[in-house]
Image (tube, grey):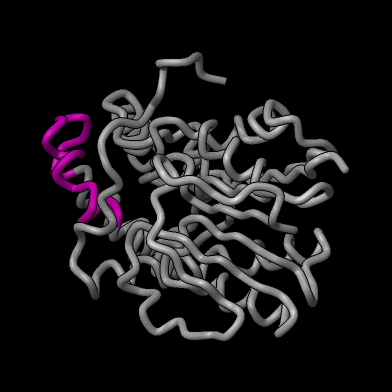
Amino acid sequence: MSAPGASHKVGDYMGPRRPLEAERERLHLLAETLDPDTQRRMRALGIGPGWRCLEVGAAEGSMTRWMAAQVGGSGRVVACDIDLRFLADLRLANVEVRDLDVRSAALEEGSFDLAYCRTLLLHLPDPDAALAKLARSLRPGGWLLAENPDMCVTVAADPDHPDAELFESAHRRIWGHIRAVKRFDTQLGRTLPKRLRAQGLVEVGFESGAGFQRGGGVSAELQRRNFGVNLRGLILGSGVVSEAELEHVLALYADPSFEYLSGLSVAAWGRRPA
């Protein structure tokens, strides 16, 4: 785990500054890619009627709506984000939407059966402080579930593909530069189990996997937009890849004949001691 003062993130999260529809589409692609595994993990933790759930970084609300359906009228879901543009129409009787920045705002303690965050911690300058708030928000016996990518694996499925070396080399350079300049932490995912144990949680478990993807699919389109739009200026301005190399990678992401293994998706969970 990083030592104090060694954060791999500086500056603000850029999502609220992106155009409304473009950001809505990006978040929808992210939810379509990640929701099935998140739902499977929550079922395994036992989510059900009457549970009180907290989601920090609710994005466009797909998981909030799903959790609300699981906990029913006797349960409650608190959905928090710093960008509420996509939660404005989330009007469910058992859902409370909060404009909340976990970096500075307090959370009620000892209140939730499940506290959850996804693709949030890599964007925070002090992820452990956020995890501490989430851990304290749990009632005794409650679960914390954190999910975060780790960009350590992005390789062509066919190692002999003529574009494999370029595809892999470009990603190593891009992810290395993003972490070096502290845009976000590309290697945080692998540290989740240790971070949860450091919060005093017990029964800590984890899983990770690299998705087998094909160009033109949902995950590939999400990455194509990230590299081609959201991170394009940072990537090309750094010189770590040329414009021709970036365009080649973007073309591979759009090519259904190109298959690849995406970066790791890491999930970790732990229970507050009873």
> Percent from the top left, x then y, of residue 87?
40, 75
> Percent from the top left, x then y, of residue 141?
84, 49
The quarter of the picture where residue 72 lies is: bottom right
Q: How many marks?
A: 0
Q: Is residue 257 visible?
A: no
Q: In front: 249, or 231?
A: 231
Q: In front: 154, or 117?
A: 117
The residue at the point 36 percent across, 36 percent down is: 184
Prevalent SS, magenta region: helix
Give the magenta range: 226-244
Q: Is residue 50 left or right of residue 6?
A: right
> Percent from the top left, x then y, of residue 82?
35, 57
Please determine whether, in this image, residue 72 is positioned above or below residue 58: below
Quick one: quadrant of the C terminus? top right
Farthest residue toward the right?
Answer: 274
> Percent from the top left, x then y, of residue 80?
47, 61
Q: Is residue 172 left or right of residue 245?
A: right
Please determine whether, in this image, residue 239 is positioned above or below residue 123: above
The quarter of the picture where residue 218 lies is: bottom left
Quick one: quadrant of the N terminus? top right
Please determine whether, in this image, residue 268 is positioned above or below residue 172: below
Q: In front: 270, or 78?
A: 78
Q: Is residue 213 left or right of residue 224?
A: right
**Residue 242 belongs to magenta span:** yes
**Residue 36 belongs to magenta span:** no
Q: Is residue 42 visible?
A: yes
The residue at the point 60 percent across, 45 percent down is: 134
